[in-house]
Amino acid sequence: MAEASAPSAAKTPVWFYIIGVVAVLWNAMGAVDYVMTQFRVEAYMASFSEEQLAYFYGFPAWFVAVWATAVWSALAASLLLLFRSKLAAPIFLLSLAGFVINTIYTFAFTPALEIMGAGNVVFSGVIFASLVFLWWFSRFSETRGWLR
């Protein structure tokens, strides 16, 4: 009598890892931006006007904390995805929630549009779309058996 074998994990396609690496690099850029802004690295901040610098440096503490949560959880989730962990999806969702909170505050309660310009809205849309995609992709990958 043959024993029932445990189902084998589905073979993870190469393009999964490509998406994972791109996610890590993309979210690492957000982490670099956060660090450079918070540490006020002159070489990085030199391209901004005095008004823009005052805007960045005037964020309330809760905003900075939510920003940190969004940025670092996105990077952590990207690494979790690359290492095929089921924790990627909930961590991407945490990042997405933080991003949405900060974006609502930014565009509804601050003069960000006047200070930073319309390009900031477009870039925020790209970030939002990437987080939604990565959250969805993590869930999709889990259903395919690529995450454990």
Image: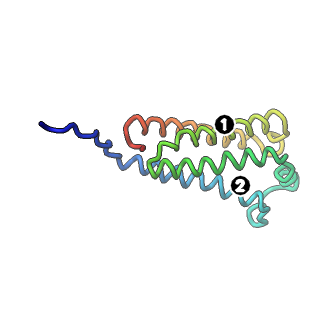
Give percent across and percent down for residue 134.
53, 41
Badge 1 crowding class, 10 Å Cα cut-off, few under 14, some 14 to 19, many 20 or more, is some
- Report the residue that reaches farthest toward the bottom: 43
- Of mark 2 and mark 1, the one earlier in the sequence is 2
The residue at which mark 1 appears reads as 97
Badge 2 crowding class, 10 Å Cα cut-off, few under 14, some 14 to 19, many 20 or more, is some
Q: Quick one: quadrant of the N terminus?
A: top left
Q: Report the mark closest to the observer, 2 or 1.
A: 1
Picture quadrant where residue 49 is located: bottom right
Element under disc 2: helix
Q: Quick one: quadrant of the C terminus?
A: top left
Figure check: 41 above or below 31: below
Out of 139 and 53, give the one closest to the viewer.
Answer: 139
In percent of the image, x 32 and y 43: which residue is there? 9
- Report the residue that reaches farthest toward the left: 1
Q: Is residue 115 left or right of residue 133?
A: right
Q: Amino acid at mark 2?
A: Tyr
Give percent across and percent down for residue 35.
71, 59
In percent of the image, x 85 and y 46: which residue is there? 60
Q: Is residue 83 left or right of residue 70?
A: left
The residue at which mark 2 appears reads as 34
Disc 2 from disc 1: Cα separation: 17 Å
